[in-house]
Image (cartoon, grey):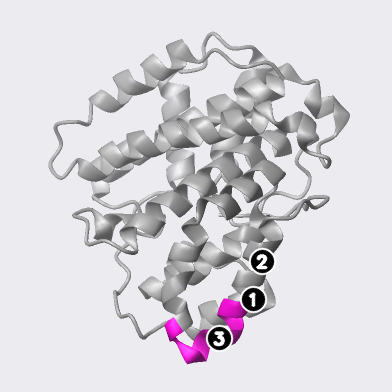
Amino acid sequence: MSSVDLSEHRKNFLRYTERFNEIPEAAPLRLKVEHTFRVLEHACRIVEHLPQEVSVPREILQDEEAGRAAVLAALYHDCGRFPQFSRYRTFLDARSVNHAVLSFKVMRDEDFLRQESRRVRALAQCAVLLHNRHILPPLLERDARFAVDVVRDADKLDIFRIMAGYLTQALPEKDAVLLHVKDEPDRWSKEIEAAVLTGRVPGYAELRFVNDFRLLLGTWMGELRFEVTRRALAESGLMEIVLEPLNKLPGLHTATKLLYRQLEACRSPRAGSTGGGQ
């Protein structure tokens, strides 16, 4: 797929987010702007490297509209976070609203995609609406599933970066970013540990402790759909930062060892899977 010109869409996104600059405690929203552009960068990289993805069908490789929809969805996937935080002062959907649904509504109401083809609009809106689903609908069309997968992989890759920073530093937005879980270094939820051992991806609402967050991020490794994403994670060193404190907890030895094996698997090419995600 050829590179996608998004200059006007970038301007539209920034004009929209500027409306929220003056609200109190706006620092987490500035982080969301940074996050958005990193997710966009990762999505563009996935689309550009598609010829190297052995599991991607030929019709997707030749589908310029699907590729454009995927990167547009990456740009707008979190636009609902701005009104969400403005109204509720949290990014925790369980305590406010589903941010993906809100992002879909913002895209529609702001008419961000008015100059795009009907198909690009439909695919991009679908990807935004579904990007945070715990389990994806089983009967998604192949092009819609592709667009969703690009956004989910790109989103996860930058969340690893964000969380590696906030799990190791006392930054001012830490509570909002970590969804207000308890910072008790020796504690974790047995339910989250069990999820790791059984290959289940927990939901955000299940998290109680910072170590739960570490375990959750570990389960995401098995959810990454594209080789380029898995390779980028393995080469970044971010997962080692996330997992390292768990090595000090003997009760988590089996779960931690399993996650390190999955990290090593990210370094090796594989045929690809069709997992769900956050």
Whether residue 250 appears in magenta in the rendering, the answer is yes
- Which amino acid is tagged 1? Leu
Residue that carries the numbered disc 1 in the rendered image:
258
Dot 3 falls on a residue whose secondary structure is helix
Residue 202: quarter of image: bottom right
Asked if one can make out residue 206 in the rendered structure from this viewpoint, the answer is: no
Judge the density around disc 2: few (<14), some (14-19), many (≥20) Cα neighbours within 10 Å.
Answer: some
Residue that carries the numbered disc 2 in the rendered image:
262
Q: Nearer the viewer, residue 78 or 114?
A: 78
Q: Viewed as shown, does residue 119 lie left or right of 71?
A: right
Judge the density around disc 1: few (<14), some (14-19), many (≥20) Cα neighbours within 10 Å.
Answer: some
User: At 30% across and 41% down in the image, what residue appears?
Assistant: 31
Q: Quadrant of the C terminus?
A: bottom right
- Tell me if label 1 and label 3 are in contact, CB under 8 Å: no
Residue that carries the numbered disc 3 in the rendered image:
253
Judge the density around disc 3: few (<14), some (14-19), many (≥20) Cα neighbours within 10 Å.
Answer: few
Q: Which mark is residue 66?
A: none
- Tell me if label 1 and label 2 are in contact, CB under 8 Å: yes
Badge 1 or badge 3: first in the primary sequence = 3
